[in-house]
Image (cartoon, grey):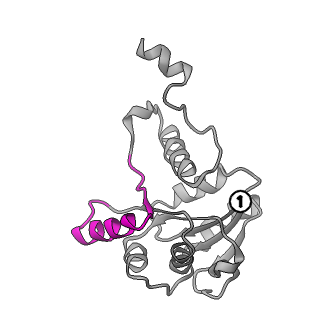
Amino acid sequence: MKLALGITGASGIVLAQKFIKYLPREIELYVAASNNAAIVSLCEEKKAIIYNDTDIAATISSGSFGIDVTAIIPCSMNSLAKIACGIADTLPTRIAAVALKEKKPLLLAPREMPFSTIALENMYKLSSIGVVVSPPVMAYYSDAKTLEEMEKFLIGKWYDTLGIQHQLYQRWGDDKQNKEMR
């Protein structure tokens, strides 16, 4: 599987780093980040190809390159608004535009809260055309005891959406939870 990962905004970059860290080795990772320096070491570890966010002619910006799934984690409100309006002036917004035109899975993880009415309208618009809008929202039913467990749950949910196999969290109905419910 070829995965294009856009990283926009500094707040929430830790989740992008962990998203990369837990990726299975067989995933081909292509990264377009506005904060390249913060992720370079992890990307090298995963043998990812890193692009500058101003390189909108990069191979991953073409539908013919064959990216299977795209995620923007975190997704700034600026990037979200551009994607919703079809503006592709940075590599992360361009890879999102390509995912949309190619009708490939696209996941956006908006990072700011509270959401303004305009941001919610943009999320609604994108969701209505098939984009998965998945902000990093705590899920208490996950029974996470630590921040790391909660982060693994969030990343696992994103992987589920993108069709990436993992064992980052205990799934509902697994033996542990079934015993607790009795």
Q: Nearer the viewer, residue 106 or 119?
A: 106
Residue 87 position in % (x across, y down)? 44, 85
The residue at 41%/68% (across/down) is 129
* For residue 67, above or below residue 19: below
Dot 1: element: loop
Position of the C terminus, as image quadrant, is top left
Residue 86 position in % (x across, y down)? 43, 83
Residue 19 position in % (x across, y down)? 59, 54
Q: Is residue 8 left or right of residue 162?
A: left
The residue at 53%/52% (across/down) is 161
* For residue 131, above or below residue 102: above
Identify the magenta region.
Answer: 113-137
Q: Nearer the viewer, residue 103 or 73?
A: 103
Residue type at numbered disc 1: Met
Position of the N terminus, as image quadrant, is bottom right
In the picture as drawn, the residue positioned furthest to the top comes out as: 182
